[in-house]
Image (cartoon, helix red, strand yellow):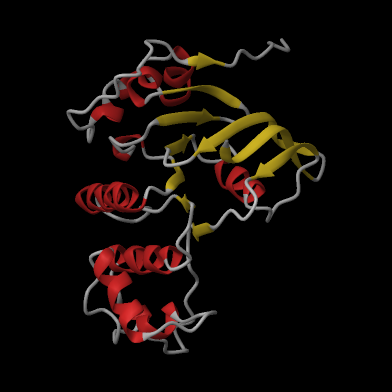
Amino acid sequence: MSLIAAEHICVRFGGIEVLHDITLSVAKGEIVTILGPNGSGKSTLLRALLGIVPVQGGRILRQAGLRLGYVPQRLQIDRTMPITVRRFLSLPVRIGEAEARAVLARVGAEGLGPRQMTDLSGGQLQRVLLARALLADPDLLVLDEPTQGLDQPGEAAFYRLIEEVRQATGMAVLMVSHDLHVVMAASDRVICLNGHICCEGTPRVVSTAPEYRALFGPGTKGALALYRHDHDHAHDDGHAHHHHEHDHA
């Protein structure tokens, strides 16, 4: 049983179809990355799955009682309103001191509790946002371009952290990225999106798919492999699942 699924969903904004006939699902414990260029509808797809954006066709299915953790793309922090990390973690549900300390330690952000949110570096802020999402003890963690603005070592460290949390908790992860160089080694599946699903499969398989090369250019060969570990998935079946589009030429 999948935790969350989309069946043939379409999303339109002002008559323009942003997402066309999308079908996907995320299973328990799976890490799925949605890749696509800017403007490809990645954030819209996440928000449709979360129920924030309505769909005009198809349907979204969620497992009963599904617990979601969401790390949004950007957090607007009011610089005139001081708020500490500890206080931020207690919004909207107050949590105890021990729980706050434990969740910060889990994401490698020990000791940040008393710090002002506005004083954090990009990497520290991402870890605090992740900590807050983990407080829900989610079955599925949803991340929208979580490493935007971080340098490459920071991105790699954040993705390793996500993999560690997945291994420790068994939660599934669905994330969006447009940066090919940091698609994590741990992704079980990569879905290439450009208004529709162009291709999907394991990272190695997708990186050689012609649809992927058409989207990202020929120079990206191997970029997906940058942070792959030695444990290449044995279930690589040697081909991506292609979604052919009809040419309306």
To which quarter of the image does residue 101 belong? Answer: bottom left
Q: Is residue 232 above or below residue 67?
A: above
Q: x and y percent of residue 44 in the render?
A: 62, 46
Outermost residue toward the left? 230
**Quadrant of res 229:** top left
Do we see residue 224 in this rendering? Answer: yes
Q: How many marks?
A: 0
Q: Nearer the viewer, residue 71 or 245?
A: 71
Position of residue 141 in the picture relative to residue 148 (left or right): right
Q: Residue at x 35, y 19 (%)?
A: 235
The answer to whether residue 243 is above or below residue 163 is above
Picture coordinates of residue 204, whole percent (x, y) = 32, 21
Residue situated in front as seen by the camera: 41 or 190: 190
Residue 103 percent coordinates (x, y): 32, 70
Residue 72 appears in view:
no
The residue depicted at 55 percent of the width and 57 percent of the height is: 67
**Which quadrant of the rendered structure holds the C terminus?**
top right
Horizontal side of residue 29 vs 42, given as left or right: left
Residue 14, x across and y down, in percent: 81, 45
Residue appearing at x 64%, y 29% in the figure: 23
Residue at 23% in and 32% down: 228
Would you say 58 lies left or right of 167 here? right
Quadrant (top left, top right, bottom left, bottom right) of the N terminus: top right
